[in-house]
Image (cartoon, helix red, strand yellow):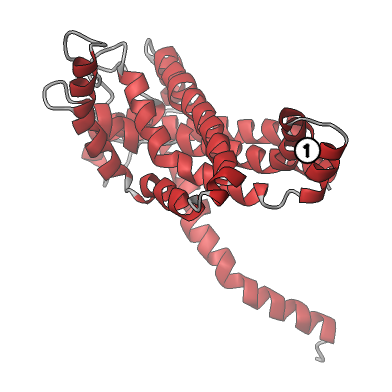
Amino acid sequence: MTISPKMRDRFTIFSMLLPTFLVIIGFYIYPTIYNLELSFTDITLLKLRQGGDWIGFSNYWEFLSSSTFFEIAFNTVFWLTAVSVFFRILLGLTFALLLNSKFLADMKLSTVARLILLVPWATPPVVAVIAWRWLFDPTHGSINEFLLWTGFISDPISFISNLKTVWPAVNTIIVWNTTPLIAVSLLAALQTVPEELNEAADIDGANRWQQFRYITLPYLMPTISVLTLMSIIWTFNNFVYVWLATGAGPGTFTNVLATEVYMKAFIDLRIGYSAAIGVTMAVVMALFGALYFRFFGLNDMAEKVG
């Protein structure tokens, strides 16, 4: 039987893509299906070998109807995700504009400023949390010492254990450690804005704000949209900062979905229940991503800029 050149080309392409497909199946699809299967059982760490009994949607219903669900969801959506992403995008854009300014270039400080900005980003999250916990320490922390010295406070503040300050403290750590990535990405986008447009607008009498509003910002919107989506997904699923900074405390005041997954799996030993929370998180992010692209389509933005 003679194989046609077209069939031979298809076979060659398939054989070249097969390793990639196997990697995707092994590292993504299979764990996803297995985790989904676990979420419908009552399996625990104590009976992993025996396996769990099939209980349907009981884990999902128990989680969604629990007394702590709305508190955990609010902490995750508002405090952990919305607040930190908002300040990261805002500060990242501010730093990008500053680094791209003629002032720093004229002062020969652009390179130094960029290196300084990269220091927080190069710091591992574990190190960042430990350093900031020391800064927030009520006894020996530099922040309390400074506030006492300036007279802003009369008594030290326990930022990590005080209900009024714990979330601002956690968000400070996240923003400090992750904003440089946003700033560097926006700086790269800023440097693609045609200078001729700003020069033409300047000749037509447009001020700095108008040039930013009608020229620079539209060029940055596709990048801002992608960075916002990536930041939301990454932060929504993040476990490290909250757990290392507060351990979901005081009590469970800063408990979020990711820490709830960990505690249910490795403290309460309920693997099936923990898997159900994880699947819920994945579904929420998948729906959010689909709606995000639907209502803030990146392709449409790119076409408008182009």
Residue extending furthest toward the right: 204
Residue 33 locus on image (x, y percent): 50, 46
Camera-side residue of 26 and 84: 84
- Quarter of the rendering containing residue 132: top left
Q: Residue at x 37, y 49 (%)?
A: 119
Q: Residue at x 18, y 8 (%)?
A: 154
Whether 260 is drawn above or below 240: the answer is: above
In the image: residue 151, left or right of residue 36:
left
Secondary structure of the residue carrying numbered label 1: helix
Report which residue position mark 1 lands on. 215
Residue 15 locus on image (x, y percent): 64, 77
Camera-side residue of 236 and 5: 236
- Count how many numbered circles sit on residues in the image: 1
Is residue 41 at all visible to an observer of this figure?
Answer: no
Camera-side residue of 103 and 229: 103
Identify the image quadrant of the N terminus.
bottom right
Kindly identify the amino acid type of the residue bearing the numbered disc 1.
Ile
Residue 214 locus on image (x, y percent): 79, 33
